[in-house]
Image: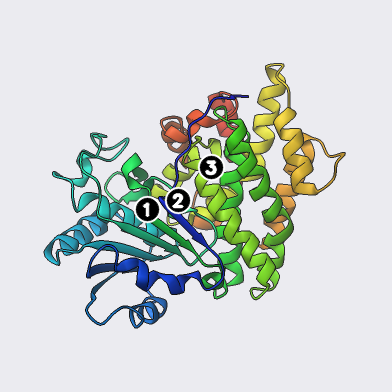
Amino acid sequence: MESNFSFATAGQLIFGNHSVNSVPDLVTNFGKKVLLVTGGNKSKAAELRTAFPDETECTYYSIKGEPTTSVIEEGVQLARIKKCDVVIGLGGGSVIDSAKAIAAMATNPGKLMDYLEVIGLGKPLSQKPLPCIAIPTTAGTGAEVTKNSVLKSVEKQVKVSLRSNYMYPDIAVVDPVLTYSMSPALTASTGVDALTHLLETFVSSQANLFNDMLCREGLTRIARSLLKAYKNGNDRTAREDMAMASMLGGMALANVKLGAVHGFAGPMGGMFPIPHGAVCAGLMAAVIETNINALQREGKALTKFDELAKILTANPNAVAADAVIWAADLVSTLRIPSLSAFGITKEDFAELVKKAKASSSMKGNPVELTDEDLYRILEKSF
């Protein structure tokens, strides 16, 4: 366990029920011209807009589905034409990732491809982005406190990141009330996304004592509240737990690399029309089991996985294998569609393994997995 660590997150965190009401006053600190990035449903954005001061000039930019590189390029042009002073992202992870990417590219020269990881040049941002306020309406991605934007390249059929220490939002406003309108299905998939963020960073090869504190707290909240929020979307305590856990997961993954679940998630999401949360749900139990087997094969201790099992099951006598059972049972109860429902077949395994091995997330896996291990994960997930 690494005792030395560094930690970074959003410039300011504002958490609590109805905290979104503070946003109009916050905006005035940055200027009068706002780019308000939202999803396909603009109702919450419109409601927020009515609370802005009269002199505020607000331009909407709607993100429908997952952000592609072309969507970001269009948003950047809009922000520049309108000479926006601040970018607000109000929505799920796709919306907030878009807002962060637009804010970053609006002030930096060149093309988006100059800065993208894996498929681009990976150049560092040279200029500080426009001020950015992130307001999540889902509880899963933790994008409001991360330094990257996950973008889809339609041409390359992969999801990659625009990443920089400059990209942490200036302010993250996390209001659990905004998540009440999530459907049970969306609650389930986003909740599992948050779960895998915390799970993978907790057992990561880069784990440290400080990050582990965040993970333990987040995992405990999800274990006790995800099913409650799924069954009753108006459960105040459960929604607060999930909003907090999502934020903690975002803070964790921004400072410690993830693992094989997210190593596969980028390629899988790029090749198939599959929600990120469904990818995480489909792979989670198989990745836990494969990592346990790989660690045992190398004669390494299962200390972290034993603790993970105790947290998830709330059973002080639980051992690593119980985490596999708990994860599989959770996904079954949440009725999240299997990976095969999205058109993935065994013929796709070779390409998925190849792309997963090149993913930066794979560097955080607690043990190096062989090609055979990676194939086994996919086989067990179908």
Pointer 2 with pointer 1, Cβ within 8 A: yes
Pointer 1 with pointer 3, Cβ within 8 A: no
Task: Estimate the x, y position of residue 315 in percent, counting from the top left.
Answer: 85, 45
Pointer 2 with pointer 3, Cβ within 8 A: no
Q: Residue 366, located in which quarter of the rendered image? A: top right
Q: Earlier in the sequence, mark 1 or mark 3?
A: 1
Task: Estimate the x, y position of residue 382 in percent, counting from the top left.
Answer: 61, 47
The residue beneath circle 2 is: 145
Query: Secondary structure under badge 3?
Result: helix
Task: Estimate the x, y position of residue 188 in percent, counting from the top left.
Answer: 61, 62
Q: Look at the picture and state if 220 lies above or below 375.
A: below
What residue appears at the point 37 percent right and 53 percent down from the top-left corner?
169
Q: Is residue 338 visible?
A: no
Q: How is the image coloured?
A: rainbow
Compute the Cα span from label 2 to label 1. 7 Å
Q: Look at the picture and state if 125 lies above or below 344.
A: above
> Residue lying furthest top in this view?
299
